């Protein structure tokens, strides 16, 4: 009984890590697409595009703690996202990280 409980706990923890990696990739993709769109259309286009991609790829509770901003830094559009994914198991910490994407601003 104890061995099966431990195996189930480890399986859930591993599944949580896989889901977090998917979420991280989805946010990275959203930032890249937002920065590319924003390099042509401006800051609001960057943020709108990134948020649409996040909604399409994540949705649900995974995007609840997402803070996404775009800004112009010299000749580049910079998209930054800070996010926290809640852990599924009580003994592991939440997963928090910040991602950044840049695209050269087009005239």
Image (tube, rainbow, N blue to C red):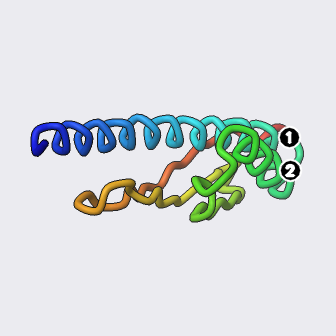
Q: Where is 76 relative to 73, above or below?
A: above
Residue 64 figure quarter: bottom right
Position of residue 92 measured from the top left corner of the image (x, y, whole percent): 26, 57
Residue sitting at x 29%, y 36%? 11
Residue 71 figure quarter: bottom right
Residue sitting at x 52%, y 59%? 83
Residue sitting at x 70%, y 57%? 70
Position of residue 27 measured from the top left corner of the image (x, y, whole percent): 59, 43
Dot 1 alpha-carbon crowd within 10 angstroms: few under 14, some 14 to 19, many 20 or more: some
Distance from label 2 to label 1 (Cα)? 8 Å
Badge 2 marks a residue whose secondary structure is: helix
- The N terminus: image quadrant: top left
Residue sitting at x 50%, y 35%? 22
78 relative to 88 in the view: left or right: right
- The C terminus: image quadrant: top right
Query: 65 or 35: nearer the eye?
Result: 65
Find disc 1 in the rendering and name its residue: 40
Q: Where is 87 relative to 6, above or below?
A: below
3 relative to 72 in the view: left or right: left
Q: Are marks 2 and 1 in contact (CB under 8 Å)?
A: yes
Position of residue 3 measured from the top left corner of the image (x, y, whole percent): 11, 38
Position of residue 36 measured from the top left corner of the image (x, y, whole percent): 75, 36
Query: 53 or 102: nearer the eye?
Result: 53
Find disc 2 in the rendering and name its residue: 45
The numbered disc on residue 22 is none
């Amino acid at each position: 009984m104890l061995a099966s409980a431990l195996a189930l706990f480890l399986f859930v923890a591993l599944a949580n890590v896989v889901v977090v990696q998917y979420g991280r990739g989805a946010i990275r993709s959203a930032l890249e697409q937002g920065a590319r769109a924003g390099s042509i259309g401006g800051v609001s286009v960057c943020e709108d595009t990134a948020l649409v991609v996040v909604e399409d790829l994540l949705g649900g509770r995974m995007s609840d703690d997402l803070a996404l901003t775009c800004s112009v830094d010299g000749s580049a559009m910079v998209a930054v996202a800070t996010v926290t994914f809640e852990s599924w198991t009580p003994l592991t910490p939440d997963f928090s990280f910040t991602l950044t994407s840049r695209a050269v601003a087009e005239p």
